[in-house]
Image (cartoon, rainbow, N blue to C red):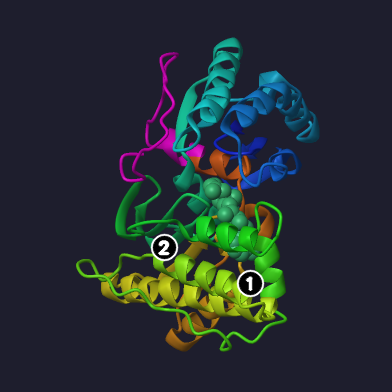
């Protein structure tokens, strides 16, 4: 089954063709990052306009790269939540028109479910159940993936998302948007023990996370050193910050794994590209004898293929949308 998959929830317009949920026939992305860099973050109105400009040609490119014609498409899958509402709507409207004109089913896909499904593309043998840490620019979730279409949130951030904090600290250090990857690169040259940063203690659910205190502490450190005209060791601050984020994410995810009794652990989302986080999970999983799934960097960030992968399993579970499909800025991964 060939699914044409559409993703437009933030600043990447993406269209892919995926076969049977596991095989990428094409995965085309038009990134708007260079444009949003000028503003230090995504400008929603500009994002929506650029999606409209890019999406039609990108769909043609996706078909061409897959060496398929329109008649070979069996269904259209689309991210319908969560994301920047205007941006998501562009993809949803395009997908509705495509499904209608091709006479094929329309499948709504939750963006964070798509991130998790990126693992199915990278690991043909991976099947639920497993525990997944999903960390992106807008969300940080520890999820029990009970089946391809049933999810239970075990832990979530109480404030900012991990990616948001990476980007904010990177921005204050003068790195262009989105700074997470640049901060990560610089961190590899630093001493991660040089700047001790606080560990936020939370009451309630032991698997919940918090990043805003950590972010504020890092920003205060940067501003104080500026005011005192002290030389900041930027690579070491990046390394210390990455370590602190890791210490928020990794032990909780491992605790969730152990408490759930699941045997497999996956990570997903843009922040899952972080080398410190990947290395920490590799060490922990080796120690525990747990199988770890880490998607290649190309499938960590937003892409259309992950929507095609999840779309296939949503289709098998009977999920369909009509021409009245709406977009949602927020929606729980559990609702789908
Ligand atoms: O999943 P994603 O592409 O988009 C959203 O759904 O938000 O995640 C983007 C986020 C950004 O905050 C970006 O800075 C962060 O992922 N990111 C990283 C790295 N690569 C991307 N954060 C830390 N280390 C990285 N290597
Ligand atoms: Zn994403």
Give the farthest residue toward the top.
Answer: 101
Above or below — where is 305 with respect to 259? Answer: above
Residue 276 occupies quadrant:
bottom right
Q: Work out whether residue 45 or residue 279 is closer to the camera in this orientation and state it.
A: 45
Magenta segment boundaries in residue numbering: 311-336
Residue labelled with disc 2: 212
- Write the residue at 42% across / 16% down: 322
Q: Point out the tag, 2 or 1, that comes first from the N-terminus.
A: 2
Query: How far, Cα to Cα, is label 2 from label 1?
Result: 21 Å
**Occupied quadrant, residue 12:** top right
What residue appears at the point 57 percent right and 69 percent down from the top-left corner?
Answer: 223
Assess whether mark 1 and mark 2 are in contact (beta carbons under 8 angstroms): no
Whole-percent x, y for residue 24 in the image: 67, 44
Percent x, y for residue 91?
A: 57, 26
Can residue 124 be seen at all in this image of the molecule? no
Q: Is residue 11 above or below residue 189?
A: above
With respect to residue 234, does 23 lie above or below? above
Q: Magenta includes 221?
A: no
Q: Secondary structure at mark 1?
A: helix
Identify the mark at residue 173; answer none if there is no mark. none
Q: Is residue 325 magenta?
A: yes
Q: Residue at x 52, y 29 (%)?
A: 88
- Answer with the quarter of the image where residue 294 lies: bottom right
Q: Quadrant of the C terminus?
A: top left
- Left or right: 261 as drawn, with respect to 30: left
- Residue sitting at 45 percent across and 46 percent down? 113
Residue holding disc 1: 226
**Residue 283: x percent and y percent?**
53, 84
Q: Is residue 59 visible?
A: yes
Question: Which quadrant would the N terminus be assigned to in this image?
Answer: top right
């Amino acid at each position: 089954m060939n699914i044409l998959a559409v993703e437009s929830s933030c600043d990447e317009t993406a269209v892919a063709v995926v076969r049977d949920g596991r095989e990428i026939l094409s995965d085309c992305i038009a990134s708007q990052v260079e444009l949003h860099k000028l503003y230090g973050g995504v400008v929603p109105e500009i994002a929506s306009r650029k999606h409209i400009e890019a999406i039609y040609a990108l769909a043609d490119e996706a078909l061409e790269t897959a060496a398929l014609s329109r008649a070979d498409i069996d269904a259209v899958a689309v991210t319908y939540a969560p994301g920047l509402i205007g941006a998501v709507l562009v993809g949803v409207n395009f997908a509705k028109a495509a499904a209608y004109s091709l006479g094929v089913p329309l499948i709504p896909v939750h963006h964070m479910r798509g991130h998790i499904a990126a693992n199915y593309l990278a690991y043909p043998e991976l099947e639920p159940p497993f525990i997944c840490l999903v960390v992106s620019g807008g969300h940080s979730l520890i999820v029990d993936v009970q089946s391809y279409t049933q999810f239970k949130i075990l832990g979530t951030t109480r404030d900012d998302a991990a990616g948001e904090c990476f980007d904010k600290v990177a921005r204050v250090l003068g790195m262009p948007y989105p700074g997470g990857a640049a901060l990560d690169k610089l961190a590899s040259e630093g001493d991660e023990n040089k700047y001790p940063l606080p560990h936020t203690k939370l009451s309630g659910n032991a698997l919940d996370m918090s990043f805003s205190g950590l972010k504020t502490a890092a920003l205060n450190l940067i501003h104080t050193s500026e005011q005192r005209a002290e030389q900041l060791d930027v690579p070491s601050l990046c390394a210390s910050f990455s370590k602190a984020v890791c210490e928020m994410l990794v032990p909780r995810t491992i605790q969730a794994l152990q408490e759930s009794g699941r045997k497999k652990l996956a990570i997903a989302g843009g922040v899952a590209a972080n080398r410190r986080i990947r290395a920490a999970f590799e060490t922990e999983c080796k120690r525990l004898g747990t199988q770890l799934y880490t998607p290649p960097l190309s499938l960590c960030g937003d892409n259309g293929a992950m929507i095609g992968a999840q779309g296939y399993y949503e289709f098998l579970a009977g999920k369909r949308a009509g021409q009245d499909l709406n977009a949602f800025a927020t929606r729980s991964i559990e609702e789908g």
